[in-house]
Image (cartoon, rainbow, N blue to C red):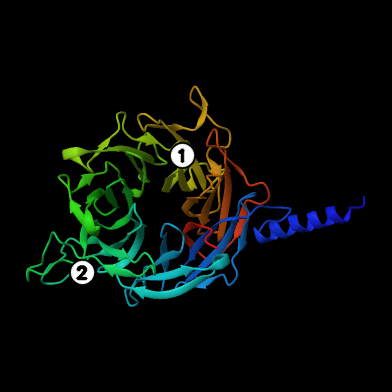
Amino acid sequence: MKLSRIGRVTLALVVSVALGLGMTACGGGTVAFLWVLGTQYNQIAGFKVDNFTGNLTQVVGSPFSSNGTNPISVAVKPGGRFVYVVNKGDDTKSIAGNIALYSVGGDGVLTFQQTYTSRGSSPIWATMSSDGNYLYVLDSLYPDVPEYPNPNGLGDITVFALDPNTGRMQLVPNQQFKDSNQSQLTFFPVGKVPNMMRVSGSCLFTVNTGDQTIVPYAVGANGQLVTTANSTIATQAVNPTSISTQGNYVYVTDAGAQSDSPGGRIIAYTVGTGSSACSLNVLTGGPVNNLPSTSNPVYSMADTKGKTLYVLNRSSLDPNNPGSSISAFTIDPTTGKLQPLGTGGGVISPGNPYTTGAGPVCMVEDPTQQWIYVSGNIDNTLTGKRIDSTTGELRALPRNSTFPTIGQPTCLALSPNVS
């Protein structure tokens, strides 16, 4: 078939526009950038997320240095212009941890800006305030000094204010508590062996594995964290491994074996308001058992529609299928209660739990609510899944669902396309 001159010009214009938008005949534009941390060589892998297929392609210049040792957590400032990487440091504490700031340029290229130090030792997690103006960094231990000793080995939260134009960080001192010299503390204490924290509205919750507690703070003005009436909450978990939030509900994964749930549980709470602000109450009916044969739940994430909770399981109780998996639970929009995602009548959907790469650590959802990605620490892969917009079930991506990445990946985060 021959094209007229006008037809050829029109076709050329269409191709030109498609290329300008980053599209090809096999995919759509780049909808987001995916950042994956790897501890083997202290690196950050950058990927472009294809809007049409969910396919991942590497960002130019990837991988990037984490500018520290043992990168373990990553947070993105709303808008996607700045990325914050938490380097835990050496386990022997001979190399201190830090927080590395990066700017995101055109086509997702990361440019290192500078590093910052949290107040405690061994930082392990970071999350943003709801308005994106503050970064909360969770430290394994708060400073043990004569003026404010730490005999019980408690952790802390270091709060930083973020410059909206440069992303730079400035310490926010604790205005509530002073040490024995009457100097303001530079941190906010939490429980023993903290491992994760999440923001829920005007509350910040930290889950602590050392004493099986949750420490709540109310988020006050100017970045202040304010103690609440219930300053420590028992989780009812044997081994709390992660915490996630959705609306007025909080979910904690418990990897501890129970007689009726050897593969672990999920404990759901409602968040108190008014005089009971930031308190937690276990939902009626108690903890929900993980899916049959699953084991060692380590992470959970509610989708942004608030319909489904996904739980990462590092292992299985089935000797014939010992792999890692993703359990899926529907969230009751009225009560927050969980039930296994299924076809009704107690029937679990085929494929649930869903397979994923070995040793899953973290999971994220893309901004268009189409795809989720899981980091596999053992097999050095990323697993992509397509979310069924109606049911919440997970499907294989249209083209490829497994992508190699840097060695020993830990956590990952997504930022919108800023190019």
Mark 1 or mark 2: name the one nearer the start of the chain.
2
Instruction: State whether residue 48 is above or below residue 398.
Output: below
Q: Residue at x 22, y 55 (%)?
A: 221
- Can residue 190 be seen here? The reply is no
Residue 166 image point, x, y percent:
39, 70
Report the side of 136 relative to 149 (left or right): right
Instruction: State whether residue 67 is above or below residue 72.
Output: below
Report the amino acid beneath label 1.
Lys
Report the amino acid beneath label 2.
Pro
Q: Give the residue at mark 2.
A: 143
Residue 365 image point, x, y percent:
50, 49
Q: Residue at x 54, y 33 (%)?
A: 391
The residue sitting at the front extreme is 6
Which one is nearer the viewer's eye here, 118 or 26?
A: 26
Q: Give the residue at mark 1.
A: 305
The residue sitting at the top extreme is 345
Q: Quick check: marks 1 and 2 in contact, CB under 8 Å?
A: no
Instruction: State whether residue 116 is above or below residue 1.
Output: below
Q: Which mark identifies residue 197?
A: none
The residue sitting at the bottom extreme is 94
